[in-house]
Image (cartoon, grey):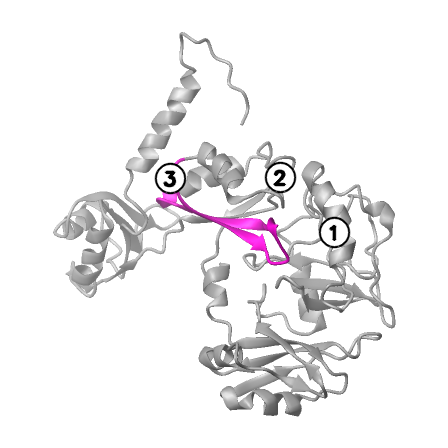
Amino acid sequence: GSLKCADVAMKDPSEEDEKRKHAELLALPPHGSEVFLGGIPHDATEEDLRGFCESVGEITEVRVMKGKGGGENKGYAFVMFRTKELASKAMEKLNNAEFKGKKVKCSSSQAKHKLFIGNIPRNWGEEDLRKVVAEVGPGVTAIELLKDPQNSSRNRGFAFIEYYNHACAEYSRQKMSNPDFKLDDNSPTVSWADPKNAESSASSQVKAVYVKNLPKDVTQDQLKELFGHHGKITKVVLPPAKPGQENSRFGFIHFAERSSAMKALKNTERYELDGQVLDCSLAKPQADQKSSGGSNSQKSALLPGYPPRVGYGMVGGAVGAVGPGFGAVGAPGLAQPLLYGGGGPTPAGVAMMPMLLPDGRIGYILQQPGMQPHTPPPQHRGGRGGGGSGGRGGSSSGGRRSNDSGRGRNRYNPY
């Protein structure tokens, strides 16, 4: 944080204000204390609702959603109780209860209290991050900093942070969205963690198995036969072999039930085809389920909403046209993949191939027809955004680690 110089005898007034503000946020009810009331009469007022809900217990806030003119309400409202327990009681008691002649619906308000933070320096540990976020604002209840599966001393560049309530999370979200806020030299990206995409919930829905080291003339039927006894298979995805890598292909086996996928991955299972032992793992949730095929995945890789900003993702900030072989890497917690390597339009005749990177992220590799993806020329290596710690760790491992999956893809680490 910035150094605060204040006269010793006199406490810095802004520091006192901060303390007071923090205390106010923590005094608000915890996450889970707010309910949604739907189907309320359009002439119902805040007072009416307070009277209706107070039979359950203490209420701290009523928000009636008004139309544009500020006259009639839109037929729904949010009511904040003092505790989670009261909110649960309200959902039982008030759902389908009659209010001014109408049956109302009462359910959880789905308030957000979890932030997603991207572009974290890769050498940071959970304690480094905890120190910084605890200074920014109050109410941090949990931190999930994802580790790099290839190297446990590094993280994957993003984290989820959970707060005591929405107000605490919103306060920190605004503070961390300030352009002056930095993690070492990195400008972090801060957004609400999307509950649908948050990795923890998404990966618990995965029903597909990712299979590596397939022989070159493998067929979908062979894979169906090999894995079919675990349960119903809905589809087998087998991308065409890449030139020069025909003997180490990969594919995905989608099961109808998650339990079948888990059975297929039991330690006791071993799969062989044409003398090659297959390497199987649970497929990672895709950053964008809708993107399938070239044209769509191209769109999802170039979504607006993430302007390429120097500091995250522009490789050295100097690459105009994107050379074949590097594209965008999307973190699973994001609806939009981040763009690495220039924000210009894709050069003509270049296809965007969605790829599963070794650590499970989805990457998009730009490929020109008939060309091998190649490692970008060395002069871009050192001068990457991120500077400081990022440059050190990234430059030596960026090129080396890209081949550990045997498919010669580039993983470009801009941090």
Residue at mark 2 to residue at mark 3: CA–CA distance: 23 Å
| Type of the residue with mark 3 | Gly
Q: Residue at x 59, y 70 (%)?
A: 290
Q: Residue furthest front?
A: 268
Whether pointer 2 and pointer 3 mark residues with C-beta atoms closer than 8 Å, the reply is no
Q: Which residues are magenta?
A: 138-167
Q: Nearer the viewer, mark 1 or mark 2?
A: 1
| Type of the residue with mark 1 | Ser
Q: Nearer the viewer, mark 3 or mark 1?
A: 1
Height in image: 228 above or below 237?
Answer: below
Q: Check disc 1 and report the residue beneath it.
A: 397
What secondary structure predominates along the stretch shown in magenta?
Answer: strand
Q: Residue at x 56, y 56 (%)?
A: 334
Point out residue 142 in the picture as x, y percentages from the top left corner: 41, 47
SS under mark 3? loop
| Type of the residue with mark 2 | Ser
SS under mark 2? loop
Regarding residue 176, the answer to whether it shows in the image is yes
Q: Residue at x 75, y 52 (%)?
A: 398
Which quadrant of the view contains residue 165?
top left
Which quadrant of the view contains residue 276?
bottom right
Q: Earlier in the sequence, mark 2 or mark 3?
A: 3
Q: Earlier in the sequence, mark 3 or mark 1?
A: 3
> On residue 43, which mark appears?
none
Residue at mark 3 to residue at mark 1: CA–CA distance: 37 Å
Point out residue 114 in the picture as x, y percentages from the top left corner: 43, 49
Point out residue 271 in the picture as x, y percentages from the top left corner: 62, 84
> On residue 139, which mark appears?
3
Height in image: 90 above or below 131?
Answer: below
Q: Check disc 2 and report the residue beneath it.
A: 187
